Amino acid sequence: MRIVDGETIISALARLIGELVTAPPSLRDAVFSTPDLSGAEREAAAILDENLRIARAEGRPLCQDCGMVQVWVKKGKFASFSGASTLRPLIDEAVRRAYRDGGLRCSMVKDPFDRKNSGDNTPASVHIEEIDGADLEFTVLLKGGGSENVSRIAMLPPSAGRAGVADIVLTVLRDAGGSGCPPYQVAVGIGGSFDTVATLAKRALLFDDDDDPELRDLILRRVPELGYGIAGFPGVRPVTAVRVATAPTHIAMLPVAVLLNCHAFRRGGVSL
């Protein structure tokens, strides 16, 4: 059994969150501007690239929405930890420390109707998966509310097939338009049940799943139908990637979750 010190976990996650806010490794300089862009879309792309450059150079948040912290833990069966009886309090303390010490905007409310801010951006959304070995692996996503709001779940009949799933994805993208801050990272979960398919889509986003290349290519071929591009301006680049995760499901069901992430793809990981 390997025991990881709780303070080591807190410090590593707090440091990672701070890096993701200002300089996510999933984004590189000049990631939005490409030669095939023109007009207002090209201007918007240049602004996004300049914003990324300034955030990195000055250590400022890439977006005013500093995100809901979502953490996927892969816990080795021979790994343990000190400082708490479960991982969740350690993760929440890392979030608390990162947002308070970093002066970051806190976006979490304690109750969905009273809307009182928690004041420290907790609680985090945590998924824990058991794996072999003695490692603790944390993958962190800072997810903004705009792109989460335009994501959707649909329960399709099995006869819908890949074409029906692609129709749903295009409908979600068409309805989203520029409101979720494109270009989008699109993650599609297919299978499982109503309560698991959204988590499946989130997994696809976090781990670059590509379970069905045929569906992925079908969606990408239809993206030009949307008619908009970066920041919702008329253009050609509303999507930068499509990821697909599938799971077994019931003979009468075809659950589909379409998860959009904005251009600020703030994802990273740490292994202890």
Image (cartoon, grey):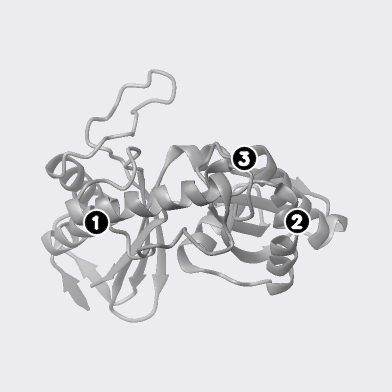
Q: What is the crowding at mark 2: few (fewer than 14 residues within 10 Å), some, or many (at least 20)?
A: many
Residue at the disc numbered 1: 56
Residue at the disc numbered 2: 166
Q: Is residue 139 visible?
A: no
- Residue under the image location 50 percent in, 60 percent down: 205
Relative to residue 80, is residue 167 drawn left or right?
right
Q: What is the crowding at mark 1: few (fewer than 14 residues within 10 Å), some, or many (at least 20)?
A: some
Q: What is the crowding at mark 3: few (fewer than 14 residues within 10 Å), some, or many (at least 20)?
A: many
- Residue under the image location 26 percent in, 46 percent down: 61
Which image quarter holds the N terminus?
A: bottom left
Q: Specify the amino acid type for callout 2.
A: Ala
- Residue under the image location 59 percent in, 62 percent down: 36
Residue at the disc numbered 3: 177
Q: Write down the quadrant of residue 103 in the picture.
A: top left
Q: Position of residue 211 (x, y in %)?
A: 63, 72
Q: Specify the amino acid type for callout 3.
A: Gly
Q: Earlier in the sequence, mark 3 or mark 2?
A: 2
Q: Position of residue 186 (x, y in %)?
A: 58, 56
Q: Earlier in the sequence, mark 1 or mark 3?
A: 1
- The correct choice, above or below, for 41 with respect to 120 in the image is below
Give the CA separation, mark 2 to mark 1: 36 Å
Give the CA separation, mark 3 to mark 2: 17 Å
Q: Specify the amino acid type for callout 1.
A: Arg
Q: Secondary structure at mark 1?
A: helix
User: In the orientation shown, which residue stands out farthest toward the top?
Assistant: 114
Q: Secondary structure at mark 3?
A: loop
